[in-house]
Structures are given as C-alpha cells and as structure tokens.
Amino acid sequence: MDLKGRGALITGASKGLGAALAEELARAGARVAIVARGAGELEQVARRIRAAGFEAHAIPGDVGDKRAVHGIAGAAAALVGPIELLVHAASTLGPTPLRLLLDTECEDLEAVLQTNLVGPFRLTKIVAGAMALRGSGLVVHVSSDAAVAAYPRWGAYSVSKAALDHLNRMWAAELSSEGVRFFSVDPGEMDTQMHAAAMPEADRSALAPPRDVARRIARMVADAERIENGARLQIGEAA
Amino acid sequence: MKPATWPRDDALRERLLHLDLASGTLRDARIADLPALLREGDVLVVNDAATLPASLQGRTDQGAPIEARLVGELPGGAFRAVLFGQGDWRTPTEHRPPPPALGPGDRLSFGELSAAVLRSSPVSPRLVELRFEQPRDQLWPLLYRLGRPVQYSYAKAPVEAWHVQVPYASQPWAAEMPSAGRPLRWEVLLEARRRGVAVASITHAAGLSSTGDPILDAALPLPERFAVPAATADAVARAHAAGGRVLAVGTTVVRALEGAALRNGGRLAASAGETDLVVGPGYRPAVVDGLLTGVHEKGASHYALLHAFAPAGLLERAHEHSERGGYLTHEFGDSWLLL
C-alpha cells in the first residue's frame, strides 16, 4: 500500500509501539490522525512528527467509550480525508500487577474487552464501510503472543487478544471480496511502559525498541497486498 | 402519514414501495428485496457523507442562549450555520424563537469553542457565516465532543451519532443524515454487487431539512458542496454504455450527479465544487434514471423533485397507496423506489 497522501488513523499512539508506528507511517507519507486518552502526551507525539516535516493531528479520546468513537472517526476523516489505513494499537492490560483469573473482577475483564476488542470492532465498523465502498483499505490489529499462549495471570488481556485475532479473521472473511484487507501482528516483547507494568523484573536490554518493531510493521503495511487477507503475523525475536 | 419516531430493529424488513416507471404500477416490497429489483449492469450511487455533530448549544456575548446548526464548512475554513433562539429539540423548528439580532464581529461561545459572526445572509438573519477561533486541529475534536446531531422533535428520544450515520459514512460533510441510504445494510449492498450491480459513491453536503424561518425554508436547498470521484463517473459511463440504469440513493445524489454533469455540458465527469441546482417538475435528468428515496408528504421540496422522474399521476397514486397502507415518513421512515 502506497501511503503517500493517504489518511491513516492510529489508536494508542501516545506512547510505545503506537507512537512509533505513527511516526513511521507519517514518514512514509501518510496523513496521520493519532488517538489516545492522554491529550498531553498525544500532542507531544503529533508535534514531534510535524517538527520532522510530516503531517499529524492529535485526537484525544478513549476507544473503549461508545460515545467517543464516532467523534474519533469523524474528526480524523475531517482532518486527513477518507481513512484508508486504520491501526488498532490501543490496548490495556487491566489492573497491574496482573492477577490470577480467580482474583480478576468481572468488571475488570469487561473493561479490558471494551478497550481491546469492542472498541476496535466499533471503530472498524464505522470506518470499513467506506473502505468496502471504495474497494480498498487496510486495517491492522496489534496482537500479542498472549493471544496464542496461556500465561498464568495474563487472563483478561490474553482472551481479549485471542478474540481480536479472530475478529481480524472474521472481518477478512466477510470483506476480502470487497477489497478491504486485514492483518493482525504479534509485535513480540518490546521495551515499553506496558511491558514494564506487566513484567517489572524483565531485563530491558533483551527487549526490542518499539521503533524497530514499528519499522517492520510499516514495511508489512507497504507490502499488504502480498499478505494473505486475515493473516496473523509475527515480528519474532528482538530486532 | 405518520413519521417513524425511532430507528427500527431490522432495516431489511422496512417497507419499500416500487413505483415501476415503465409499467406505471405500484408494488409493495421490503428493503431486502431491493437487489432483486435491480438488473445486472445497473449502478447504485450512494452519498457517503458522514453526519456532522451539527447542533451546538451556546450563548451570545450578552448571555442569550443560542443554538447553531452547522450547515457545512466553506472553502477557507469558515462554517455556514443557521441560528436558533432559546429552546431545544422538543420544540418543532418552526416554533423555535429566532436568535437575537447578530452582526459581523459578534461572538458566540459553545463551551470551550468560540466563534465570531463573519456575515449574515440578506435572505434571513438566521443564516450566518461563523469563524471558529480554534485552529482546525483543535476544532474538529471539540466539535465532536460538544456538538450533537441535529435533533428531530418527532423522535421519541434524543438521537445519537450512531442513529444518523449511513453504513458507509466517510467524511463528515452532511448537516443532516443523507437518510435514503440509512436502511441500506451491507447485506443489501453485497447482494446487489453479487448480482452484477455496481455500487459507487459521491460525497454531498446534505443540508438542513428545516430552518424555522419560512423565507429561508423557501430558499432551501442552499448551495451544497459535492465531490464526484473518477471511479463513479466511470461506473456511470460503463452502465449507460451497456444499457444499465443509474439509481440515485437520495435526492442529494441526484443533485451531485446532475449538478456535476451540468458543469460539464451534460456529461458526467469527476468533479468537485458547490451546486445550486434545484431539481423539480420539468427537469430532464441527464445522468440519473431512477431514485431510491424516503416517503415524502406532498408539498415537501423532496416530493417536488420526484416529478423529474415520475409522472404526477403515478406519484399521486403512490402517495394515496402509502397513506392507506401505513407507510412511515421522515428520516427513520420507509422508502420509495422510482425505477
């Protein structure tokens, strides 16, 4: 997918992989609209991208909030034009330190599903109809190896990512005939705040910098036509 | 006829009256039947404008309550807007008091948003151009946080953003929902494509349905922004070359396609701009062969537009049939297919 001049919407873009991806995609020529709950950090990312000579607009909002998603999609389309690339990088672990399932409150599981599964569903539902009408568009879901492996204490996050992977496959099954493409990607272990919250004892030097992972995902976006629709991709070992 | 006061659970079961233009007959159907009423080689053209959070509650500098309904963004970043005085959606528009007298330079505030009046229209003091003081980057997220969709006094509750979007909405250009497309679930659109019907789009800044000022209402529709992409111009040309028909979903699509063709000597080409074309009795469409539209009362400007596609006698019979059969009107109502 040639990103030059195309509208892209990236959630979870105030830090970590989302912020790095926004920078990479803007560098590749996309007009990016970036979303996160924290307005201050988000605006700093947008400023950094603009200072480098690329286009970025900050849209503060919570993808897990039903009332916010039409505003996120609408403001983004007003600012960058029709959304041709949607990246779901927003994600929450739920309460940390991570808890055993027997100690997980039902409400905490629901909140994780809202942000990691229902939010992406809502936003794609709003954006992908216009993609299907145009016969083109790409939606990327940022997944995790916790979607496949069952690590004790990662329950809420893990089931949300497993469901997100399958949501990715379902979208592809229904819309590949209309030219809309989907993939999910497991970025591997990265040196992010989220990783530190989940595994504070981890050796950071063994973790991949988000920027390196973002570069590889940006290349996948560029090559999206060659990727099987609905595929689950892995970045693999630290770059 | 009665309005539908709320979106219904199953759009596919909503009623569709087919006015068969060739035979002059009427046939009751459902939205789910639409693909079967089309032919391979036809093209269905929809308006992909998302509906703006166009209604902003605010105050003048003197503290008087005011509602601004944004009609659309103008080149240069100002907004055309219609102003209302005190009150909310429970009061029908025609009973809403006018806004206080405002002129160039007067300021309005809407929570964290503020705007200055650039000019008032000679047609009606309610119609103004506003310039928001916030840069676009800040303006759009704030508009969505503070604005609501234009409300309907006949609706049984306040309508939310998700009630007034078509299922393929893209850029937020429409002051009110381009409602003919509302019941077109993807089930219908994909079935049409499976049958060899092309589905294409234009973007048209559907305006307000009512302003509360009879003089301004008489001037509707105002000039409206539109864009016809090359892919749609090509789809229309291919359909016509092969004997297919062009079905417009809604009167805004008629305005965009016919307005674009008029600027190009009667032939549709990719174009963008504003159109002030008013289609009505006596107008001979150059591009559009048929129309999917809501059910309209006689006397509405939308009803007048139907005369460009169907003889008055057929429309008269369709109106009586709809009245007798309990067809529902307005934004969440049933549909007519003129084809």
Image (cartoon, coloured by chain):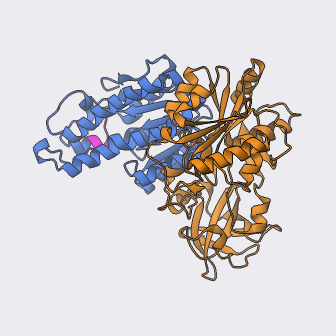
Using the image, determine if residue B43 lies above or below residue B70. above
Quadrant placement of the C terminus of chain B: top right
Q: Position of residue A16 (x, y in %)?
A: 37, 41
Bounds of the magenta segment:
A189-195
For residue B227, side relative to residue B328 (left or right): right
For residue A145, side relative to residue B100 (left or right): left
- Residue A1: tell me if it is visible: no
Q: Position of residue A114 (x, y in %)?
A: 32, 46
Number of numbered discs: 0
Q: Of B184 and B312, which appears nearest the observer?
A: B312
- For the point 42% across and 29% down, the residue is A171
Using the image, determine if residue B153 lies above or below residue B305. below
For residue A63, side relative to residue A152 (left or right): right
Quadrant placement of the N terminus of chain B: bottom right
Q: Of B284 and A114, which appears nearest the observer?
A: B284
Report which quarter residue A152 is drawn in.
top left
Q: Residue most toward the left?
A: A102
A52 is within the stretch colored magenta: no
Q: Of A175 and B115, which appears nearest the observer?
A: A175
Q: Position of residue A2 (x, y in %)?
A: 58, 26
Using the image, determine if residue B99 lies above or below residue B201. below
Using the image, determine if residue B225 lies above or below residue A25. below
Q: Position of residue A145 (x, y in %)?
A: 26, 29
Q: Residue most toward the right?
A: B265
Instruction: Supply the letter of whichever chain is orange.
Output: B
A191 is within the stretch colored magenta: yes
- For the point 22% across and 36% down, the residue is A203
For residue A166, side relative to residue B220 (left or right): left
Q: Of B84 and B250, which appears nearest the observer?
A: B250
- Residue B237: tell me if it is visible: yes
- For the point 49% across and 50% down, the residue is B7
| Hue used for the chain lettered A | blue
